[in-house]
Image (spheres, rainbow, N blue to C red):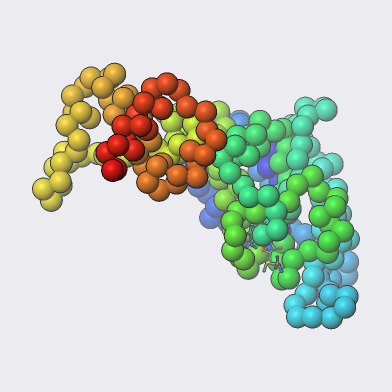
């Protein structure tokens, strides 16, 4: 897939682009990534990107023309993207739909994902009606969309073929609607605290059952909202019943 990121501050992506997972995805030819400088689409030597809001008020608003010309450029440079391929353009904004693992999975299936980073007070409203989606990474306000675009791209890139060496993304938190079970590594005892015995047993079925139980326990404790309306297997329902009894 190709990811195009439109930003006024391309230099903020310098170290992000050096990340080992991102670089591996490029080497495995799963990923092309380009950072497009919105300033290149602004007229004159002054690079007029923002202006004061109609109706008055604090701050500046990003103008339609440079942002949408940059978007059209990104849409027209689908080098390596199959004809008729599927593409999504998404504006980063706190008002958008909350980004989650399901969206990351669906973006990872795209041929082309275009992310637009806002700044200042945000973008002229007419930009939002010309993109496919508006995406938020949470209910807080960042200074600019760059960190949001990095978060979205990172979550997508690690799902691309070959990006993660052992392909271990399928058991992670949110993948099956639950938080991941607790993980441990060497040493088996640290400051008197031992790793659960079952993990040292080498018994695959017992380990699977323990992990499912602990995954359910963690979800029940930390994110019970994830269990609302989630379809349960018979085994999961039984474990949840036991966990509920334990808590009484
Ligand atoms: N005035 C805007 C508002 O109240 O909604 C906030 C603008 S914010 C200071 C500047 C830019 O940061 C936004 O245009 C957006 O691109 C980005 N941004 C801030 N918070 C974000 C979030 N939670 N998710 C995604 N993007 C965000």
Image quarter where the C terminus lies is: top left
Q: Residue at x 59, y 56 (%)?
A: 138
Q: Is residue 162 left or right of residue 215?
A: right
Residue 23, visible in the rendered structure: no
Residue 191, visible in the rendered structure: yes
The quadrant where ligand 1 appears is bottom right
Q: Is residue 85 left or right of residue 236?
A: right
Front residue (pair 222, 142): 222
Front residue (pair 93, 148): 93
Tally of numbered tags: 0
Front residue (pair 15, 186): 186
Q: Residue at x 66, y 37 (%)?
A: 107
| Position in image of residue 68 (x %, y %) | 85, 55
Rendered image quadrant of residue 57: bottom right
Rendered image quadrant of residue 198: top left
| Position in image of residue 3 (x %, y %) | 68, 42
Instruction: Give above or below for 125 relative to 109.
Output: below
| Position in image of residue 156 (x %, y %) | 59, 40
Q: Residue at x 78, y 63 (%)?
A: 123
Image quarter where the N terminus lies is: top right
Q: Residue at x 37, y 46 (%)?
A: 221
Instruction: Give above or below for 120 relative to 109.
Output: below
């Amino acid at each position: 897939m190709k990811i195009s990121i439109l930003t006024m501050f391309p230099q903020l992506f310098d170290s992000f682009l050096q990340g080992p997972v991102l670089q591996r995805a490029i080497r495995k030819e799963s990923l092309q990534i380009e950072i497009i400088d919105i300033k290149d689409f602004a007229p004159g030597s002054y690079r007029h990107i923002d202006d004061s809001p109609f109706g008055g008020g604090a701050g500046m608003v990003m103008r339609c023309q440079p942002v949408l010309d940059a978007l059209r450029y990104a849409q027209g440079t689908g080098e390596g993207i199959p004809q008729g391929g599927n593409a999504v353009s998404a504006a980063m904004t706190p008002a958008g739909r909350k980004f989650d693992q399901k969206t990351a999975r669906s973006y990872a299936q795209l041929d082309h994902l275009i992310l637009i980073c806002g700044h200042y007070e945000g973008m002229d409203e007419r930009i939002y009606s010309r993109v496919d989606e508006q995406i938020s990474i949470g209910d807080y306000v960042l200074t600019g969309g760059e960190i949001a675009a990095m978060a979205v791209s990172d979550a997508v890139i690690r799902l691309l073929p070959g990006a993660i060496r052992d392909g271990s993304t399928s058991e992670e938190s949110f993948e099956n609607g639950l938080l991941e079970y607790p993980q441990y590594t060497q040493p088996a005892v640290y400051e008197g605290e031992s790793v659960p015995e079952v993990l040292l047993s080498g018994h695959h079925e017992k380990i699977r059952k323990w992990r499912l139980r602990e995954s359910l326990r963690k979800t029940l404790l930390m994110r019970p909202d994830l269990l609302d309306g989630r379809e349960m297997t018979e085994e999961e329902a039984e474990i949840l019943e036991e966990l509920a009894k334990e808590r009484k």
